[in-house]
């Protein structure tokens, strides 16, 4: 999927966020059990023109 920068109106570039554990994730609240059905990896999308960043989960349907 492509996302546009709200400031520059150019296509944002998909990136990754690094951490000591190697993943950046979202988990639906309240946390019952950590399952893949209620969580998803998060990816930042960066504007190469102005540096604006938006975060999107890979599987938004897991939060219904």
Image: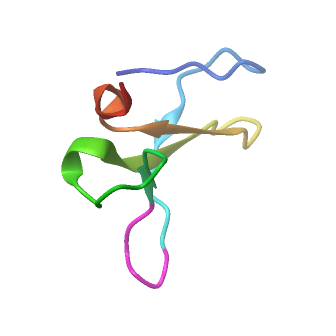
- In the rendered image, residue 44, in percent from the top left (x then y), is placed at 52, 46
Residue stretch in magenta: 19-24
The residue that appears at 34% across and 21% down in the rendered structure is 1
* Nearest to the observer: residue 16 or residue 25: 25
Q: Residue furthest left?
A: 36
Q: Going 49% across and 77% down the picture, which residue do you hit? A: 19
Q: Quadrant of the C terminus?
A: top left
Foreground residue, 3 or 57?
Answer: 57
Is 31 situated left or right of 62 in this image?
A: right
Q: Which residue appears farthest toward the bottom when viewing the image? A: 20
Which residue is situated farthest in the top direction here? 9
Please say which color scheme the image uses: rainbow
User: In the drawing, does residue 13 fall left or right of residue 51?
Assistant: left
Query: Where, by quadrant of the figure, is residue 7 drawn?
Result: top right
Residue drawn at (72%, 18%) of the image? 6
Q: Nearer the viewer, residue 4 or 37?
A: 37
Asked if residue 19 lies left or right of residue 60, the reply is right
- Name above or below for residue 31 compared with residue 44: below
Residue 47: % across, % down: 64, 36
Viewer-proximal residue among 23 and 34: 34
Vertical order, 19 against 46 (above or below): below
Question: What x and y, as percent, mark residue 63?
Answer: 38, 32
Question: Is 51 part of what is drawn in magenta?
Answer: no
Is residue 21 magenta-colored?
A: yes
Relative image position of residue 52 (x, y in whole percent): 72, 38
Q: Which quarter of the picture shows residue 24?
A: bottom left
Left or right of 56: which side holds 47?
A: right
In the rendered image, the vertical position of residue 23 relative to residue 52, given as above or below: below
């Amino acid at each position: 999927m492509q996302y546009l920068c709200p400031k520059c109106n150019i296509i944002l570039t998909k990136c990754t966020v690094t951490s000591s554990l190697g993943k950046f994730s979202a988990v639906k609240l309240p946390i019952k059990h950590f399952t893949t059905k209620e969580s998803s990896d998060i990816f930042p999308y960066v504007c190469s023109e102005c540096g604006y960043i938006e975060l999107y989960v890979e599987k938004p349907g897991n939060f219904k």
